[in-house]
Amino acid sequence: MGEDNLGGRPVNISKAINLQECLNTCGTIDLGFSGPRFTWANQQPLSTLIQERIERFFINSDWNVLYPEAHVTHPERSHSDHSPVILSLHTDQEVRFPRPFRYQPMWLSHSDFPDLVRDAWFGIPYLPNAICAFTTKAKIWNRDQFGNIFHRKQRTCARLRGVQIALGNNPNNFLIDLEKSLLAELTTLADLETKYWSLKSRITWVVEGDRNTTFFHNSALIC
């Protein structure tokens, strides 16, 4: 039982035994997980840090026969003190599609963007040639300045997941500070991603600053 929490109140042995007896009577087992060890943390300094694995999935043998590939994932905690807990019944296969060139509103937030536009159009008398020059320069500039938002987000989430796994095993002040830094970076990337989806969705009544809800994404996909 001590593997499920770090800090805080000690486990109530009597209640833990009762729960274990109930699980044994029902013939269920813990499905296990991959990812960070704990699903909740109080996000406090090391001296008062508490981490616990609160959420979990229990299955019986019949269910396991129906879904032999089922597995549980603990993604990184980002905007909450709780980690999402994802139950996947099958192995996912990601499908990638090529993306056409599009202007991104987030470019306006960068001080170098007006110079990029000026340089791309300077000395080119024909509109099609100017557009072609701007497209080429913008692609290179976007890659250098912003990179691929989704890849950057994946890398940041992977680093955050690794830090939170390490925090579950050996918490220290360095890891706590690094987690805060990665959370701030993830917030910045979320703002950039919101601007990306705002353009793609073409929903004029979306209020500036709306987060990436399921409706927001689905609306973008059906445009």
Image (cartoon, rainbow, N blue to C red):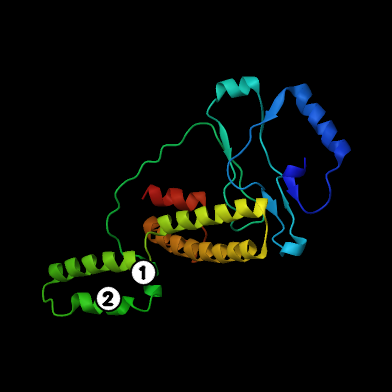
Residue 150 percent across, percent down from the top left:
42, 55
In the foreground, 17 or 78: 17
Q: Is residue 12 left or right of residue 117?
A: right
Provide residue 201's location: percent of width, then percent of height: 40, 56
Element at badge 1?
helix
Nearer to the camera, 151 or 7: 7
Q: Helix, strand or loop at disc 2?
A: helix
Residue at 19% of width from left, 76% of height from top?
121
Quickly name the residue at label 1. 145
Task: Decide if residue 199 is on the left or right side of residue 40.
Answer: left
Binning the other alpha carbons within 10 Å of mark 2 as few (below 14), some (14 to 19) or many (20 upward) gives: some
Of callouts 2 and 1, which one flags the residue occurring earlier in the amino acid sequence? 2
Q: Is residue 167 above or below residue 57?
A: below
- Residue 116 is labelled as 2
Q: Residue 183, relative to residue 5: is it above or below?
A: below
Cα separation, mark 2 vs mark 1, equals 12 Å
Q: Quadrant of residue 56?
A: top right
Q: Amino acid at mark 2?
A: Leu
* Mark 1: amino acid: Gln
The x, y position of residue 187, in whole percent, is 53, 64
